[in-house]
Amino acid sequence: MEGNLVNQFYNQAILHPKQLAIVSKKRSITYFELSNQVQQTAASYHKKGIRKGDKVLVFVPMSIELYRIILALFHLGAIPVFLDEWSSVRRLNEAAETAKCKALIATWKGQILAWFIKGLRSIKLKIMPSESNNNYVNVDIAAVSKDDPVLITFSTGSTGKPKAAIRTYSMLQNQFEALKIYIDLNIQNSDMTSLPIVLMINLGLGKTTIIPDTNLKKLKNMDSKRIHNQMVYHKIYSLSCSPFFAERYAHYLLETNQESKLRSIIIGGAPCYPKTVEIIKLAFPDAIIRIVYGSTEAEPISSILAEEFLDYYNLNEFQGLAVGSIHHYTNVKIIPVLDHELHKLNEIELENLELKQNSIGEIIVKGPHVLRNYLDNEVAEKQNKIITEKSVWHRTGDSGYFDENNRLFLTGRCKQLIHCEGKLISPFVFEEKLGRISSVELGTILKNDGEIICVIQSKPESDNKRIEQEIKTKFPIISRVKFMTHIPRDPRHHSKIDYVKLKG
């Protein structure tokens, strides 16, 4: 389906005007109400001079306001731009200067922040999220082509020029279609999600979405009791979230001996280990649980049901995360882990690079939903894209392998792999095994001056000498064990180890 994506939302507003679109904390809005507000907001932005192709930086948390703003910008053919809020001030400034936005839409906190960051301060048109126009004159929906940019997101990174992923209308529509096969399509079944793209898909399907009543930027402080009260009150049928979110909620249910009425759970955004899946499955015995693997530039790549995931680990030693069958939109190859560019290859050269089964290498992907370009960043395109005479492949930066049954396994980030005695060792694999040692909350391995060092975050009042002895007995390759009170994790999903901070 081509055309402006906002039309899918407007069509649902015509078909289901009284259906709740979004519930956020104590507020809710129907499709009819949201449709009117989107048109009012589009008229207001148009009056301020925002037009098709203009880039607009959006600093608004996941809320009713955020989606009203995004849809209004889509209506005008303008391009919402999202920076990585967890970046340093320096990186935010670099990203803002790269984006060259015409306007900034931000909460008062974002407006204050803008005065201290040169790249944001230079944006002349600044708008509060609440701004709209009740006495509006209808503005025509912008005509767009499939190759027009619709959305720009900056990915996490601490070095080099910031990477800004450009999504076109065609790519985003294909991504919606690819993800839709995992989503319950019955509009009578309400969904809770902490994943922004899922809420956007739901708006195109006419579904009701409940935003979790917690600070999604600080998931480690998540109030599971409040989440459960939302689940019960709104009779929520399905949940889509990060592994950390699902595990925290699962622990709450098990510790308080409460049952869940959830029937569908989609987990994505970060790796999901067997120990985590076991806890989630125990807390939600009647739910269909699906783990989706993907990346910023390619979502989804594959998926696997929790039962299949756990069955595999009950029969085999952990040698990587099983991420299931490849999505039919996606082609996947495994190539050697290489530091240099592979930007221009012919089909035969690429075919010759492909590794055999059970060989760890870099996962590369292509498909209609896979990102093709970055904003004004030729270096990133050369580093991350392989262009042949027939297609464009994306280098995910993830390592993995296909087994003899052509199932895909993930072994962590390529840059974290350790070369030791002619072999590639995956810290990712060790993290799962270390997590199964009693009293270990989190652990990984690093290479330093030729030594393999194990870093452990143990539970309070643990017997660290016992833990160290067990680790050295099980893993002779480890020279030293270092204990930390806190191993840094990614701030977005609180699920992945932040290796940059750990090594720093």
Image: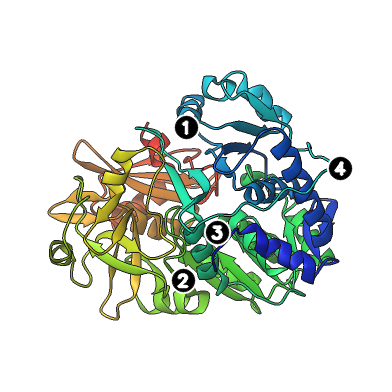
Total residue callouts: 4
Q: Which residue is mark 4?
A: 134
- Front residue of 361 and 328: 328
SS state under label 4 = loop
The answer for how far apart the CA atoms under marks 3 and 4 are is 41 Å
Q: Residue at x 38, y 60 (%)?
A: 433
Of badges 2 and 1, nearer the viewer stands: 1
**Dot 3: element:** helix
Q: Which residue is mark 1?
A: 95
Secondary structure found at label 2:
strand
Instruction: Identify which residue, 320 or 440, lies in the foreground.
Output: 320
Determine crowd level at label 1: few under 14, some 14-19, many 20+ residues with C-alpha closer than 10 A: many
Which one is closest to the eye, mark 1 or mark 3?
1
User: Looking at the image, is mark 3 or mark 4 nearer the viewer?
Assistant: 4
SS label for mark 1: helix
Query: Is any part of residue 399 visible from this angle?
Result: no
Reading the image, the residue beneath label 2 is 303
Task: Kindly identify the amino acid type of the residue bearing the numbered disc 3.
Answer: Pro
Contact? badges 1 and 4 (CB < 8 Å)? no
